[in-house]
């Protein structure tokens, strides 16, 4: 089964991508997104394993709720509160979260 990671922005994608030791599609919501736009974004990946990495802030919470409605089967990971944003989270923490999500990491 293919895997797909959903993040909020390009900086998050660039932070996660070098940690992965396997080919994974990383999609960006580019911040707040409507349910229709989210479904359009993920339509081609509906049969993939979808994992989210959203910030531990108000926008991240909105996205988590939206994902729960649109894709309840998606596995969601929350960045630890002390780092708030994916792009500011230390590599070792991101690596641990990715391993928990069963990704191969460097």
Image (cartoon, rainbow, N blue to C red):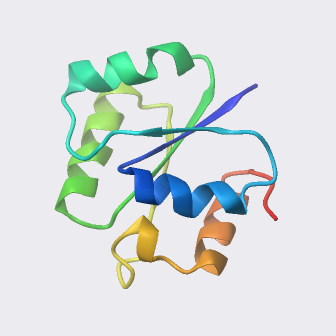
Number of marks in picture:
0
| Residue 88 visible to the viewer | yes
The image quadrant where one finds the C terminus is: bottom right
Residue 17 versus residue 34 in the image, above or below: below
* The one of 81 and 41 positioned closer to us in this rendering: 41
Residue 88 in the image, given as x and y percentages of width and height: 43, 76
Answer with the quarter of the image where residue 86 lies.
Answer: bottom left
Toward the bottom, the furthest residue is: 82
* The one of 68 and 98 positioned closer to us in this rendering: 98
Residue 91 versus residue 60 in the image, above or below: below
Residue 17 versus residue 42 in the image, above or below: below
Report the side of 66 relative to 12 (left or right): left
Answer with the quarter of the image where residue 80 lies.
Answer: bottom left
Residue occupying the point 60% across, 69% down: 94
Residue 15 in the image, given as x and y percentages of width and height: 54, 63
Residue 63 in the image, given as x and y percentages of width and height: 27, 45
Answer with the quarter of the image where residue 60 lies.
Answer: bottom left
Residue occupying the point 80% across, 45% down: 22
Residue occupying the point 25% across, 47% down: 31
The image quadrant where one finds the N terminus is: top right
């Amino acid at each position: 089964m293919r895997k797909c990671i959903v993040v909020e922005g390009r900086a998050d994608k660039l932070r996660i991508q070098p940690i992965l030791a396997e080919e994974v599609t990383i999609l960006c919501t580019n911040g707040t997104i409507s349910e229709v736009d989210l479904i359009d974004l993920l339509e081609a990946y509906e049969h993939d394993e979808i994992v989210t990495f959203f910030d531990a802030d108000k926008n991240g919470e909105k996205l988590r709720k939206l994902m729960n409605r649109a894709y309840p089967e998606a596995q969601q990971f929350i960045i630890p509160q002390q780092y708030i944003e994916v792009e500011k989270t230390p590599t070792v923490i991101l690596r641990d979260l990715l391993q928990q999500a069963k990704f191969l990491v460097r």
